[in-house]
Image (tube, helix red, strand yellow):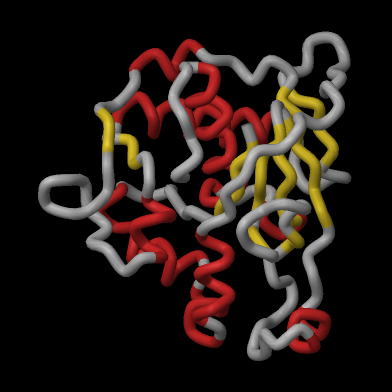
Amino acid sequence: MFSVGCEPCKWRFHQYTHLILSVCVPIFLFVVALVISLLGCGGSFTASDPPACSAGTPFDNQTNGGATQQQLMTIWLWAQNDLATNPIPLNPVTVITQGGVDKCQPAGDVRCMPAQPDAMNIEPDCARVMAVPDLSAAHLAQLGYPGLKDPTGIIAAPNGAASSYCYAYTEGNTVYVAASMVLSDGATGWEFENIILERLGIPVGGR
């Protein structure tokens, strides 16, 4: 399964609008169209090559110094705790991009499921984290997205995705994340959540 997102889930779900403004603010203020493409990028892709970890390390850390094993584990623990203690939105990307109400049903339009305590039992198991160089603001301006500043936190989405750009995406057991967003719960943490949910047998296509 493949997932792409910029969903900033560091705070609780009912604050998603704040999150987008906080984490995606340069894009949200200057290029609304690009925000929409960052939010949703569906598709199904072949998993990348299996990660390879050194003995005793939880992650295949390919962040080029952007994060230590300990820092990645801190983000993983955050993702576990968030899933184990808060309602889990299953289709926030669809709702936000369609202008729906970003609250769990029935108060809003987002389908949510109860917190999943079993998330605390899911270990990284050699999940790979690959830092991808941010696209430059100058490059994005040439493509019709002016007003951004470096580092943009944006990378190209893979072939076949529903949009062209994103903060991070997951193929199989590998998270690809913009280099400037490696330590972000809303990028790496969100994709860690998707890996955990998939291992629990929960579809993540709407996230």
Question: Where, by quadrant of the figure, is residue 43 drawn?
Answer: top right
Total numbered labels placed on residues in the image: 0
Quadrant of the rendering where the N terminus is positioned: top right
* Residue displayed at 66% across by 55% down: 181
Residue 12 in the image: x percent, y percent? Answer: 31, 47
Residue 204 in the image: x percent, y percent? Answer: 48, 35
* Residue displayed at 51% across by 33% down: 193
Task: Please name whichever residue, 79 or 45, is drawn nearer the observer in this view of the structure.
Answer: 45
Looking at the image, residue 103 sits to the left or right of residue 10; the answer is: left
Q: Using the image, determine if residue 41 lies above or below residue 205.
A: below
Q: Using the image, determine if residue 102 lies above or below residue 202.
A: below
* Residue displayed at 53% across by 46% down: 185
Task: Please name whichever residue, 51 or 156, is drawn nearer the observer in this view of the structure.
Answer: 156
Residue 171 in the image: x percent, y percent? Answer: 71, 36
* Residue displayed at 40% across by 28% down: 81
Question: Where, by quadrant of the figure, is residue 85 drawn?
Answer: top left
